[in-house]
Image (cartoon, helix red, strand yellow):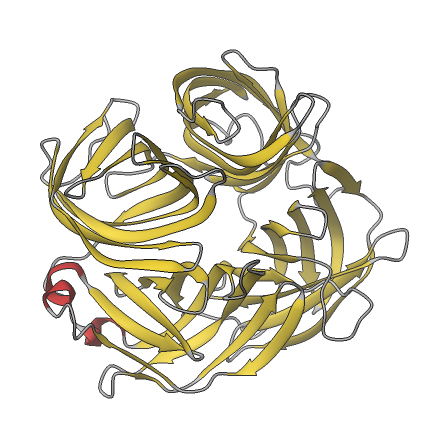
Amino acid sequence: MRQWRNGQYAFVTNGEVFTSGASFPTPLARVGTFIADGKGNITGGMEDVNADGTPSNAIAITNGTYTVSADGRGAMTLNLGTSTLDFGITLTSNSDGLLIDETSNSNQASTGSGNLILQQSTPFALSEIAGTYVFDFSGSDASQPNPNPESFIGQFVVDSNTQTIPTGFFDDNVGGELNSGAMTPGTIAQDPLQTSSFSAFGRGIATIAGQNFVFYIVNSGRVRFLSTNNGMLSGDAVSQAGIPGGLTGGFVFVVGGSSANGGLTRVGRFTVSNMTLGQMLMDVNDASNEAQFNNLSNGSITSYDSTTGRAQVSFRDSGGQVYSFVFYLSSANSGVIQDISPSGTVGFARVTADGSIELQSGSPFTSANVSGTYAMNWSGLVVAGGSFPIEDEEDLLAQANVTSLTLSGAADLFQFTSATLTPRLDLGVGGAIQINGDGASDDGHRNGMTVNLTGANPINFVVYVVNPQLAFFANRDNSGTPRVVVGILKLQQ
């Protein structure tokens, strides 16, 4: 039986919100911490929210409740004085898990995907986060009335003695416009307006590359950030250690974002050997138009800096289209990645998207080692049909038992295209994973997954396995309900 340990948990979600009386949803990001007593009660906490560029800071979580079943699925309610938030949860261990926003009440309907991680024991100190970090912040810029999508990744150094961020390097993609270079010096400190929030919750404020953020310390290896001016950016900074002198091995990557057509996902893999790129495979979903790329060529690594962990890779499809990515490794096995595929205009990319890159290990992947109970989450866009099709947020969170590559379990699903704006809870999950070749896709063979939800047509995905404990997937068959979603399978520990 999986249960939460009592303690403080740092959480984050990204999605959309319908406020009372609104005709359209707006983007929403939240970051915060809550205190669980190990007995089903939330005894306090704090959160910061950014709704389409409008921040609400240091909101007190007064109390709440939670339940967790034997399969690790559960529910949580947070009370914020006059308002209430509801979440679905699937634990991946006793100290972390995945969650989706399932709030639907008279004040608002909000959904979005995220996660929760047990915070270190209080009190907090800036000295605990001194060092070098790799970060990935995504969302939108400050342009009004139509903000541009933004991806902001890079590396920075925290000096706790001077409470500064003295050095850093970044890559920024704002609506396709690319900028890269050294950061201007920044700051990181307690919030002078909420001094008690630092010792109690690890909450403070920072200025990074000229933008203001609130942060929550998770532990000495991770800090969560949310912008408080200049648009709506959120994400994590992860401590950097063990960067290799050179790149080698197979890497799986996944990015999500947008193009001029609508929502966009790319998921794929490549192998690095002697600083050359090969065995490339990629699947793309651009506004519900899915394409599989089998004959990728001209793979190259144009740069790799072992001091920053920064690398740039590119390859071509059979039609001559170039795909380029920049990534920063936080360790030898993991990092963040940004799509910078050229548009034909110097300094501009075709899309704005970012995500994760992971070193593959543990292949061949078979029914013997892809087995057990997994937390499953996907997030993105779904299209509701009819005379006037609607495209909006969809989030799913499930627990799936994988036995002989067959799926069974239960899920919560929240679609913002539903007329009632209410989540569908405890749906049955069925289906199967199809592994082809050695399962690593380095032989050109793709893996698939079919998910059957109660009351829905089968949903088909392409799957790229990182290791037996982790896989990325994206939908690949829009013959039924069109979707543009990416997701994760993570083994429950």
Q: With respect to residue 219, does 416 lie above or below?
A: above
Q: Nearer the viewer, residue 87 or 62?
A: 62
Could you tell me which residue is drawn at 16 percent across and 75 percent down?
192
Could you tell me which residue is drawn at 50 percent across and 19 percent down?
407
Could you tell me which residue is drawn at 18 percent across and 57 percent down?
120
Residue 489: percent from left, percent from top: 48, 36
Residue 430: percent from left, percent from top: 51, 15
Q: Is residue 84 left or right of residue 303?
A: left
Q: In what quadrant of the picture does the C terminus appear?
A: top left
The part of the image, by quadrant, that contains residue 338 is bottom right
Report the residue that reaches farthest toward the front.
21
Report the residue that reaches farthest toward the top.
455
Q: Nearer the viewer, residue 482 or 266?
A: 482
Q: Is residue 185 left or right of residue 334?
A: left
Q: Is residue 365 visible?
A: yes
Residue 297: percent from left, percent from top: 84, 57
Q: In what quadrant of the picture does the N terminus appear?
A: top left
Q: Nearer the viewer, residue 24 or 351?
A: 24
Report the residue that reaches farthest toward the right.
319
Q: Is residue 25 left or right of residue 442?
A: left
Residue 65: percent from left, percent from top: 15, 32
